[in-house]
Image (cartoon, rainbow, N blue to C red):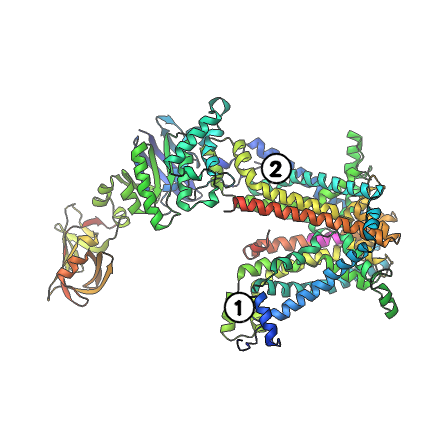
Amino acid sequence: MVAASSTDGAALPSQGRAVLSVLKKPSVIPGFGLTMGFTLAYLGLIVLLPLAALAVKAAGLGWAGFWNAVLTPRVLAAFQISFGLSLLAAAINAVFGFIVAWVLVRYRFPGAKIVDALVDLPFALPTAVAGIALSALYAPNGWVGKLLMDWFGLKVAFTPLGIAIALTFIGLPFVVRTVQPILQDLPPEEEEAAASLGATRWQSFRRVVFPSLFPALLTGFALAFARGVGEYGSVIFIAGNMPGVSEIVPLLIVIKLEQYDYAGAAAVATLMLAASFALLLLLNLLQAWMRSRHAR
Amino acid sequence: MAIQVSGITKQFGHYRALDQVDLEVRSGELLALLGPSGSGKTTLLRIMAGLESADSGSLQLHGEEALGLSPRERQVGFVFQHYALFRHMTVFENVAFGLKVRPRAQRFGRSEIKRRVMELLELVQLAHFADRYPAQLSGGQRQRVALARALAIEPKVLLLDEPFGALDAKVRKELRRWLRKLHDDIHITSVFVTHDQEEALELADRVVVMSQGRIEQVGSPADVYDHPASAFVYEFLGQVNRFDCTVADGVARVANGALAIPTENGVQGEAIAYVRPHDLGLSPSAGGPGRVSGIHVVGPDARVEVDLAGLTLEAEMDRERLSFLGLRPGDRCAVHIDRARVFPRR
Amino acid sequence: MLAKTSGQRPALDDRSWVRGFLILSALGFLLLFLVLPLVAVFVEALHRGVDAYWDALVEPDALSAIQLTLIVAAIAVPLNLVFGVAASWCISKFDFRGKGLLITLIDLPFSVSPVISGIIYVLLFGLHGVLGPFLKSQGVQIIFAVPGLVLATIFVTFPFVARELIPLMQEQGTEEEEAALVLGASGWQTFWRVTLPNIKWGLLYGVLLCNARAMGEFGAVSVVSGHIRGETNTMPLHVEILYNEYNFVAAFSVASVLAMLALVTLVAKTVLEWRFGAELAATRH
């Protein structure tokens, strides 16, 4: 046993230190015990313990009770609405977010820096503010809603379309901010090589540029989608919240809670949590797979 | 004439990258554009490929004006310093790219593309790596893939931008010999850019020495080395001793006459004399004007530093010669100059 | 005139109609989804005049909401700041098993719906929750009270500081700290004099984002708040109540304050990125 250099965990008995050295490489830098202890305690109390409470509550229903709580037409419809419209909004963001990233990286135009900064607005603007602003804007008497109504007879606010609008707003930065840095770092020589090998601009984009950006685009799409599924504040004002038509899962959870159906709320919440974790896991696996193929 | 460059000028902001450059590239030759960074050599190469536009002048590829043509219309093979291989494509797909993007009417069938690509991969000795991704190859292998990819479109000329610049010394030398041999086999008109004089002199049929956007000299490697046209070329090619001197009556006097160099080119007055280390002869001499201040043995060669009236000279000889002379640090010696060039001071 | 290409590389030039079309598409999209909603907030807030706007902000319930929002942020942000620094210290300066898992767990709250972030505390501390009966017997109320708001806010802003600092500190490595220790500095001295100066902009960046989210959080606090006017209403919740009472001018007036907070955050963030972009580069994903 090495003489106790009082670096980490000063008061650990020698046996404890031996166990620690299996888990952690030795280092001269102090503070491991303190920071690790605080990190784990804080993480445990704030995040893990409450999440465990959710699991406990849902498990209290039993297997059959859980599925009974979840497999009702209203819950299933809410899942369909939440996932379907999040998918739609993420797809809209994939298209326009890609264009925004392209324009910001490749072209110079007046105000580009302001536009660039503004892209993060949905991250910074409180969701409730976004919610009432969007619903005022897209309501039948709002600036945009009135035009859509007069020109196309389209009702946006208080319909599922309104939900898609809110989710598009909320997910907007994800695609832009994942594609932008990759596009920035794309070596221009690859496109020059394509051009000198006879490719048209479109061929060079489709065969060289786009495949390089696709993993980032997919990541941004998945992040926007995952965010959309859980979103609450910006949606409830514009959605209309009709059960089975425009009622999203998070709202349904809140409603169950307000009706003191704690177990039901826990069950739906658990299912949603499981779904978003599965999604993130899938995404990570996909990214790992793509990285392993094309890593520099 | 494969490439005819006339009066090409290129300005980046206030910086003139190329200034009225004229150059002819002969069919089938391997030409080196040699110069320090910022000399305009890469800009000239990129203008030939259409990857950069010229402000004025003309560029003819095989007798046809090419400045108005886009890169894809020029049928020029370009090899990039950092390979610029398509990361998400296999080696095969990289090489096949130029054939697959042809307009439908000119495109080969699948089997013909495969045949051509495999033939090229044989040529660059990478046929067994066809299914690998660029990330799985070494630097030298990647550069050979890049070369095969450029050759696939059957270019009229091949342009290489610092083709060995990103490789380590050993691979660089191997690949250099290999490229020379390849060129002797297929005789495609080739221009390559380099800042490494050894590379240019060893590899090229002719060398173009560039500085500050202008061409200083064009000639065979022996030509530019033995008969440098300017002080810049002399200094840039190889090691050199440089002295301030005064020329009178055909003799350049260095350090108040401590060293006298006969001149032939009619320079008068203030001038600069250049002597290559291997053109500087030493002999032991107890009363000689020089004093050996240091000896560095590098492999088979020896570099001897000599103090002469306040100047430091460097002489180069093989080790046998050194031990024959028996010079040691501190010894006095005589200095004689076998060959020198004197240029007027600017 | 509308669009010049970024470089001197003809091979990367797009045709001018392509450029024009893409720029107009991008700007049109952003106008519709970002600019108009932002403008709408201020127009709706002011359309009955400045007096109505001001009245909505100084009425007692609004003032108490503003106060509560400040209190919640003043507790949650410093706690997450300390946690973020501690977590990034132990993650970036040491090698240990399970590091990947720890990072994933720290990021976890970002992938949880705000509603779930609130509900877990209700299920833990609420009257029918796991610890509810015990807390009631002790006379402690967490849910429908300020502690619940603080907890939910800490949860949703949990990863902000740590996630900015971890990549930054990992990139900086441990050499400078080792040098300081060899020169005789104590652990605290090393942290204050060597580490902190190196990470201060990244730290500020993280705190900025953390604060914006803490003051603007809606879903999570909505679940734990109980919406008691003048007591457990933060500004976003106050906006909701006013809006649902069809008191649109007042709702948008309070919302406009939050929107200004968002704009200030964006400006500060942009300034940080411009001035210290290189130092923050590791944190941009």
Examine the image and state in which quarter residue C153 appears: bottom right
Q: Disc 1 sits on a residue from what chain?
A: C
**Residue C284 visible, this orientation:** yes
Examine the image and state in which quarter residue A235 appears: top right
Q: Is residue C246 above or below residue B150?
A: below
Residue B168 appears at what percent x and percent y? 37, 50
- For the record, the magenta segment spans C257-263
Q: Tell me the kind of residue under disc 2.
A: Ile
SS for callout 2: helix
Q: Is residue A251 magenta?
A: no
Q: Is residue B71 left or right of residue B251?
A: right
Q: Quadrant of the N terminus of chain C?
A: top right
**Residue C218 visible, this orientation:** no
Q: Disc 2 sits on a residue from what chain?
A: C
Mark number, residue C177: 1
Residue B2 appears at what percent x and percent y? 33, 29
Residue C243 appears at what percent x and percent y? 84, 48
* Residue denoted by label 2: C23
Could you give the CA–CA distance between mark 2 and mark 1, rounded to whole angstroms? 47 Å
- Which residue corresponds to the image point at 67% horizontal and 37% vertical from the top-left? C28
Residue C170 appears at what percent x and percent y? 56, 60
Crowdedness of circle 2 by 10 Å Cα count: few (<14), some, many (20+)?
many
Q: Tell me the kind of residue under disc 1.
A: Glu
